[in-house]
Image (cartoon, helix red, strand yellow):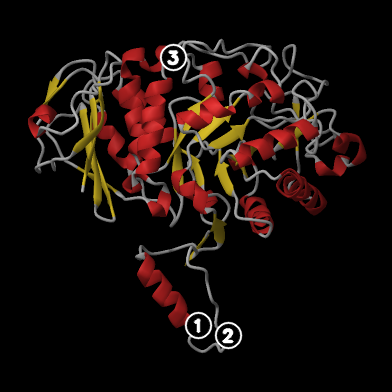
Amino acid sequence: MRKIFKSFIALSLATSMVLSLAGCGNSSKKETFKEDEVVIGERTQADWIDTAIIYEVNVRQYTNEGTFAAFSSHLERLKNMGVNTLWFMPIYPISELNKKGTLGSYYSIRDYKEVNNEFGTLDEFKELVNKAHEMGFHVILDWVANHTGWDHTWITEHSEYYAKDENGNIISPLNTDWNDVAQLDYTNNDMRTAMIDAMKFWIDDIGVDGFRCDYAQGVPLDFWEQARTELDKIKPIYMVAEDGTNSDSLLNKAFDSNYNFELYDALKLASSVPNTADKLESYIKKDLPYGAFKMNFIDNHDKNTYDGTLADRFGEESLGALYTVVFTAEGLPLIYSGNEEDSDISLEFFEKDNIDFGDYKYEKLLTDFCTIKTENEPLYTGLAGGKVRMITNDNKSILSYERVKNGKKITVVVNLSNKEQTVKYDKKISKGNILLNGDSTGIINDEKTTLNTKDLNTLKPFEYYIILSE
């Protein structure tokens, strides 16, 4: 594990350690650290994050049955695809009072320490976690700390835990249409303790490895920092913030990463508007608090339900190029339930829906990306990987960059337009082995294994190259 310290100036790891030790020069106490610990921080970071590939699991819609047991049958396939981290959307009992639609929202929670009986029992979920761990997966849970459902026991037993209007009535979150949930009051310390206790339950008793925290910006920063400190005492975990403000403050002590919404928006722009690939540069190499990183994606439950299918949002022909950026830019990649099946899937939120698995149209492509991400050190996440170095070119539809770590270099060239493009680079691109090459046809070119650098001067629509040099 790593201990991540907030850094106010850009220092190399070696320099940071020297300064830390120098600051303790007058102390007789001497700390010792394990070889696999890097002492750089105020939170602990789990080593398994270095090669993590997160798969968002929508239990309700994953199978006809919509149960833990039915999902469990897909674990072997997901492992073979290269997925190694499972993020379960909320699995807790859903409030009946004021629920939306027929089945209600996963994010309207009635009990933080139980599971939705439509999915199975708590023991069955624990068995699923144990099985996943035995197979080499890590498991994180969606955590909703901003609000509860209206029939959560706290409503009647601890109404002081909730925000109220001037008449003393519990309110829904302000400036939202979330009338199926009640706003928690974080000025109440007893509520904070109860919330952290519930989070500890899932780590201590069930064995999960972290949390994806919903609407993280709605909860006071000092609560997240308090929670992280307490949870890290149990074991090194991973925490990712859904933070629409893109604030760095959450990444200092509380969270390892947050959503790369800016990259998502830039990819959407580049895939539809010519000559805008240059807008991506600041979002694939953004400076963040030391040790922090982004979660890169082109799909998740919100985008999928409310903005349409991948094909609707990006066009099917662009997906290989977009996944190239998601998997090779600095950060950690996310795959959503069903992405491997097809690009025309959009899942209901408050009703029963189903992913009709069978064709697995994109499974081979995603397997290739997962393999490349986990087997090439320059592409590792956070401090373990190489920093992005842009390769300047003369075409604003072409994105080109490299990442280097321990003598290995990964070079990435992507045409983010639906037209053939010619391009010149400001430096000679190193010869190497082609790890992946495809284009708008969706066909992977397995015949070319050694790069002819002339190939990079003319790129087909949405063509992409990932190249390894040593």
Q: Position of residue 320 (x, y in %)?
A: 33, 23
Q: Are marks 1 and 2 in contact (CB under 8 Å)?
A: yes
Residue named by callout 2? 29
Give the amino acid type for the residue marked by disc 2 in the picture.
Answer: Lys
Task: Tell me which label, 1 or 3, sits earlier in the chain.
Answer: 1
Residue 297 seen anywhere in this rendered image of the structure? yes
Residue named by callout 3? 343
Dot 3: what SS? Answer: loop
Q: Position of residue 156 (x, y in %)?
A: 91, 35
What is the crowding at mark 2: few (fewer than 14 residues within 10 Å), some, or many (at least 20)? few
Q: Judge from the rendering whether residue 440 lies leftward or rightward of residue 260; answer left or right.
A: left
The residue sitting at 46% across, 15% down in the picture is 360
As measured in the structure, the alpha-carbon distance from the residue carrying label 2 to the one carrying label 3 is 58 Å
Looking at the rendered image, the disc whose residue lies closer to the viewer, 1 or 2, is 2
What is the crowding at mark 3: few (fewer than 14 residues within 10 Å), some, or many (at least 20)? some
Q: Quadrant of residue 157?
A: top right
- Residue 196 - label: none
Q: Position of residue 442 (x, y in %)?
A: 30, 15
Task: Tell me which label, 2 or 3, sits earlier in the chain.
Answer: 2
Give the amino acid type for the residue marked by disc 1 in the picture.
Answer: Cys
Q: Position of residue 152 (x, y in %)?
A: 84, 32
